[in-house]
Image (cartoon, grey):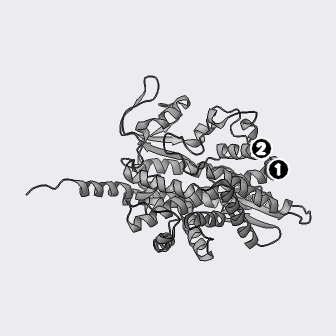
Amino acid sequence: MVIAPVVIAALAAVLVSLPWWLPGRVVALRGWLFARINGDEGIAVPGDLVGVEHFRDVYSHPAAGGRSRGAALSDLFWYWLSPGAHVHQEHLEAGERYDEVARTTRRFLAVPRSDVEELTRRCVAQVMREEATGVRLVRLRDLMMPVWAAFYYELVFGEPCPPAARDLIVGNADDVVTALKCCGLRHMDRRRRLTRYLAGRLADVRHPLPNGLSPEEQAFYLQGTFFNTAVVQMSEATAHLLMVMARHPGAAAAALADDDRDLDQVIQETLRLYPLFGIAHRITTGDIDAGGAATIPEGSVLCFSYPDFHRAGHDDPGRFDPGRFGDGAAAKDMNHIPFGVAANRPCPAWRLAPITMRVAAREVLHRCALATSAEHTRSLPSRGPCLLVPRGAPARSRRAALLFIWTRDRVEDVSRGLVQLVLGTYMVWDARRQRLCERHFARAEETHAPSRGP
C-alpha cells in the first residue's frame, strides 16, 4: 500500500515526459528497421567517403545519373508513387523517353511570369473565400493543397478547376504525401479515380503529350508529374514558409513589404532549413573519382542528403536567419541546392516555384495574421497547425489558442510516432515484397531479349 503512490507518481511522470523522449526513440527505431529491411546498400553523401567539399562535384558527375534501376531503395519510392512510377519524370532512366517527357513538362511550365502570378492570386483567393470566417485553427498543408491543385489543373488544362476535379486531385496528393510520411497506408482507390479522370481528359490538355507513351502512361505522366509531385511539393513548401512567418514576425513583415529582396531571403532560408527533398538516391553508371584516393565504383547507390548539405558550412545552422542570404550573398556560393543541381536533372519548377510561393504567402498574409506554437520540422508530419486571425479582427489574447496548439501537438507527436513506426515498417516490408521497380526492369529485359532458337 505504501508503494502504490510512488508507482502511480512514477507512471504519471513517464506519461508526462513521453513527448520529450519517445518521438526521438521512435525515429531511431524506424531508421534501424528501415536499414534492416532494405539492406545497407547506400553510400551517404556527404559522409565518410564523400565529404561536403565534393558533394556538388559527385552530384554533378555524368556517371551519377542512374535513377531507379539497380537499387533496392527504388522499390520503396515506386511503391509510394504508384501507379505510374515507371513513367514518373524523376524515375525515368536517361534516354529518348525521358527527353520527350522532360520537354513536355517544360512546355507546360513555360508560362509568362505575370500570368503565373495572377493565376496564383486567383487560386489563393478562391480557397481563402471558402474558408470559414473569423479566427480559426488550420493545418497549413491542408489549406494550401487545394490552391496548388487548382493552380496545376489550370496550367495543364487551361481552364478553371471544377470543384469535383479539385477534390480528386487533393485526395490523390494527400494520400501520396501521407503514405510517404508513414502517417497512413496507401488508398489506391483514390489514386485510380484520378487516373481514370485524367485518362478521359487527355484530349483537353494545353500541350501535346509524349508520343512515346501509351494513353494510360500519358495519364500516369500527368498524375505523377503535376498532381502528385507538383501539388505535394508546393503544398509542403508553402506550409513551411507560412509556418516560418507564423513563428517569426520579421519574416511576415518581409512578406507584407513591397521589396521582393527581403522576402526572397526568407524563402531561401526556409528552403535551407526545411528542404523539400530529404534523400535523393542515384545509381552510378560508371566509376566516379570522389576526390583524393576515393573512387566510387559503378553500380553504387549514392544517397545525397539535402538536410546535411544545407547545414554544413553555416554558423549555428539550426537557427532561422534570412540574413545569410543578404548583403550580396549568392545562394549558388553556399551549400544550398533547394532544387537540385543543374547537371543532374534539377527540379523543372525551379523558376516557377519561388515566384508562386512569394505571391501565395503575400495573398494569405494580406488576409490573415498567423501564429503557431507547434514544432516546426523538415518532414512536417503535423501538416503545420496554425492559428489564422483575419486582418481587422478585434485584438484578443491568443494565449489559450496557442496553448491548445502546443498541447495537442505534443500529444499527437507521441501517437503519430507510434503510427509511423507501425505503418512505416509495414510499407517498407510490403514494398520489398512487391519489388515494383525490380520486376519492371526484369520484365523489360525479358521483352527485349533476343529470342532463342529451338
Q: Amino acid at mark 2?
A: Asp
Mark 2 element type: helix
Q: Is residue 293 visible?
A: yes
Q: Residue furthest top?
A: 292
Q: Residue furthest right?
A: 395
Q: The N terminus appears in which quarter of the rendering? A: bottom right
The residue depicted at 72 percent of the width and 60 percent of the height is 385
Depicted 188 relative to depicted 341: above or below: below
Depicted 321 relative to depicted 373: above or below: above
| Label annotation for residue 257 | 1
The residue depicted at 55 percent of the width and 31 percent of the height is 52
Q: Earlier in the sequence, mark 2 or mark 1?
A: 1
Q: Is residue 308 left or right of residue 100?
A: right
Residue 344 horizontal/vertical position (percent): 48, 42
Residue 369 horizontal/vertical position (percent): 82, 59
Circles 2 and 1: CB atoms closer than 8 Å: yes
Graded by Cα atoms within 10 Å as few (under 14), some (14 to 19) or many (20 or more), the crowding at tag 2 reads many
Q: Nearer the viewer, residue 427 or 446?
A: 446
The residue depicted at 49 percent of the width and 69 percent of the height is 191
Depicted 394 relative to depicted 279: above or below: below
Q: Amino acid at mark 1?
A: Ala
Q: Is residue 43 left or right of residue 356?
A: left
Residue 96 horizontal/vertical position (percent): 37, 51
Mark 1 element type: loop
